[in-house]
Amino acid sequence: MGRRSETPRKGDLREQALLDTAEELLARTGLERMTVEDIAKGAGISRGSLYFYFGSKQDVLAALVARTMVAIREDATRAAKDTDTPPDRAAERALQHTERMWREHGTVMRAAVENAALNEAVKRSWEETVEAFAEAMRHVLVRAGLPDGDGPTDAGALARALCWMTERVYYRAHGDDGDTLDRATRTLREVWLRVITPQQPQQQP
């Protein structure tokens, strides 16, 4: 078992350097080819010193995912507490923030999706973050007038389905040309807004 799998301690520049190096290596070589020795060398420490912080490459990945998820959870907390922003604008803002995270940390987020089945810490961090965002968006949907019950068409179930759909759409869009994430956001925006502000049926002439 590794010694570290949670969010790194604040102020530990060496640990931060290990995670920064791991993220760079993920983008350049991928997880399979990335080695503990490469991570240590990139951070300017010995392989033996790395094991003071992490027991394995999978532990590094778990901490890297946890660090990335912090920003997403902070967005979720702000969305839940912000009752002044109209629901449609809150949903648009959440999508913009999510797109930005995929642009800036997409390699980490892809690795989280692809390794969740093999790494329990990664799975827990990823699923808890998506669920936290779904809970935040439940409040947004309730403010939009959707019922706050336990049924399959109530705000909680809809928010959860929309958030997991959003996760999958961005996962599939990441890695293509630069416009793909933008197109994904526009499509997701349309879906979210149709739930928040249902289209009125057109009257027959």
Image (spheres, rainbow, N blue to C red):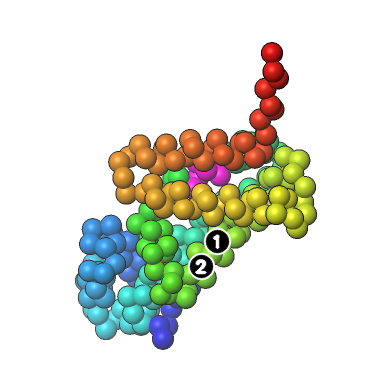
Q: Which mark is residue 129?
A: 1
Seen from the viewer's position, the closer of residues 3 and 110 is 110
Spatial CA span between label 1 and label 2: 6 Å
At horizontal 75% and vertical 58% (from top left) the residue drawn is 150
> Quick check: can you spot residue 13?
no
Nearer-the-camera pick, 45 or 87 = 87
> Do the residues under discs 1 and 2 have CB atoms within 8 angstroms?
yes
Q: Give neighbour class at mark 1: few <14, some 14-19, many 20+ (Cα, 10 Å).
A: many
- Left or right of 30? Residue 101 is right
What amino acid type should be assigned to the residue bearing mark 2?
Ser
Looking at the rendered structure, the secondary structure element under dot 1 is: helix
Q: Position of residue 73 (x, y in %)?
A: 56, 57
Left or right: residue 190 compared with residue 168: right
Locate residue 87, reporting x and y percent.
67, 39
Q: How many marks?
A: 2
Vertically, is 88 above or below 103? above
On screen, residue 76 above or below 26: above
Q: Main secondary structure of the magenta part?
A: helix
Label 2 sits on a secondary structure element that is helix
Tell me the tag on residue 125: 2
What's the amino acid at mark 1?
A: Thr
In the image, what residue occupies the spot 69% across and 13% down? 205
Residue extent of the magenta highlight: 93-98
Q: Residue at x 74, y 55 (%)?
A: 151
**Residue 72: percent from the left, percent from the top?**
52, 55
The stretch drawn in magenta includes residue 21: no
